[in-house]
Image (cartoon, rainbow, N blue to C red):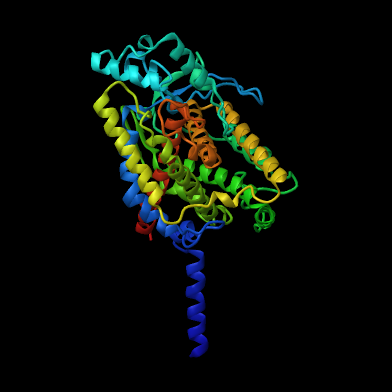
Amino acid sequence: MKMKMKMVVGSLLLLLLLSGSTDGRCFCQLTGDLDDCTCDVETIDKFNNEQLFPKLKKLLESDYFRFYKVNLDKPCPFWMTSSHCGLKACAVKPCEPSEVPEGIRSSPHSKYSAEANEQLVECEQAGRLGAVDVSLSDETRRALLNWSKHDDDAERFCVLEDEESPDSQYVDLLLNPERFTGYKGPEAWRIWNSIYEENCFKPLTVKRPLLPDSFHSGPGGEANTFHRWLQGQCVEKRAFYRLISGLHASINIHLSARYLLDDRLFQERWGHNVSEFRLRFDSELTAGEGPKRLRNLYFLYLIELRALAKALPFFQQPSFRLYTGRPEEDQSHKDLLLDILQVARSFPLHFDETSLFTGDEKEAAKLKEDVRLAFFNISRIMDCVECFKCRLWGKLQTQGLGTSLKILFSERQIEALPSSSDQRPRFQLSRQEIVSLLNAFGRISTSIRELQTFRSLLAEER
């Protein structure tokens, strides 16, 4: 009898292993503490979904943050691309000049001098908000131009030349949402392969578990070798890989959450594709990689959240304005931005960036420069993406992450922000950096929120 009972129990256990719930297989490792951090997944979920996400969503719908300037026609600097993606869903519709608020397109108004601010106030009082440039003296205009080209003491981690390029156009992010476009295959994988293989400090002898159809070629030995190598790296190189992996995971969540479910004429229907989510994150379908990618998403969230918290003093400056030309709206949106940053600062378990680039000063400086150049290179790879919509969001999110890194490693410049508005601060953020910073974090925040939906959908399939 006991032997029979053991056989029954064993059969049940085997059945459970073979048919284990998909939600368990996707989220099996998505709990508890995160590596290299003092935070846990559950704390982030509650904080993001209840406190931060609703406010951030409202802010990103405002005019200042919905219009992003981008050059989608830059050639790939690394290889010849055969042609641009011809898929309908890949297209991006740029704005007509009249659709962009005058205050956004009239001048580089994210960096003001005391004189410029005083004259802008006079303009508002005179009802001439659309004529910002002509209200400034020649001297002030020259100063603004110099500041817009000024590369401040904190070195940039990404390309910013789109901001002043004559080929750049404004795009309404709300009308060009990030979603599944059908862009896949060798061209898409070439982008990610170039990022991981050539810019994540990985030797070619260590195989990375990423290529499609490679998961079933062996018992996971290559994946184990890769993660042993990764664990043997310094914390900075591990963090760099996890940031890229987290960004990749976030993009895959967006594509799965806004998938074309019905393509009937004039009746397109977009929504959550659970099967697509499984293909990207189910532990069995990805040789155990999927849950690791989701954990890296949370690591990326902590990095960008920390950057927002550290940037608060910059945005608190009286001279800083979210200028669109509508004073009451601009002030209310600045108040909302400051509220969001205060909430970000209140998070109890922030990532400690002081643990990075420590030790020998020369070696730390060399390592930081290597990381900066690697990320700078990744931002250039975005111009090789042949799907315009994918290129748009890829450029925005890499620029946003690059801006986060710039903030994290500019602590001294931020602490030295002048108390008087007649002094030019050494630390600067352009409007382009500000828009990408908040929208990139908005994408990560949305991904965390979407995981809650996918949990529920997978649980319903049991």
Q: How many marks?
A: 0
| Left or right: 258 as drawn, with respect to 352 | left
The image shows residue 251 at horizontal and vertical percentages of 48, 40
Picture layout, residue 444 above or below residue 288: above
User: Could you tell me if residue 195 is visible in this image?
Assistant: yes
Q: Nearer the viewer, residue 346 or 384?
A: 346
The image shows residue 195 at horizontal and vertical percentages of 62, 37
User: Could you tell me if residue 71 is visible in this image?
Assistant: no
The image shows residue 357 at horizontal and vertical percentages of 63, 47
Residue visible at 45% across and 39% down? Answer: 311
Question: Which quadrant of the figure has residue 61?
Answer: top left
Picture layout, residue 316 above or below residue 100: below
Judged from this view, the residue extending furthest toward the bottom is: 1
The image shows residue 447 at horizontal and vertical percentages of 42, 45
| Left or right: 262 as drawn, with respect to 151 | left
Q: Nearer the viewer, residue 92 or 174?
A: 174
Judged from this view, the residue extending furthest toward the right is: 205
Residue visible at 39% across and 17% down? Answer: 105
Q: Nearer the viewer, residue 163 or 24?
A: 163
Residue visible at 41% across and 54% down? Answer: 44
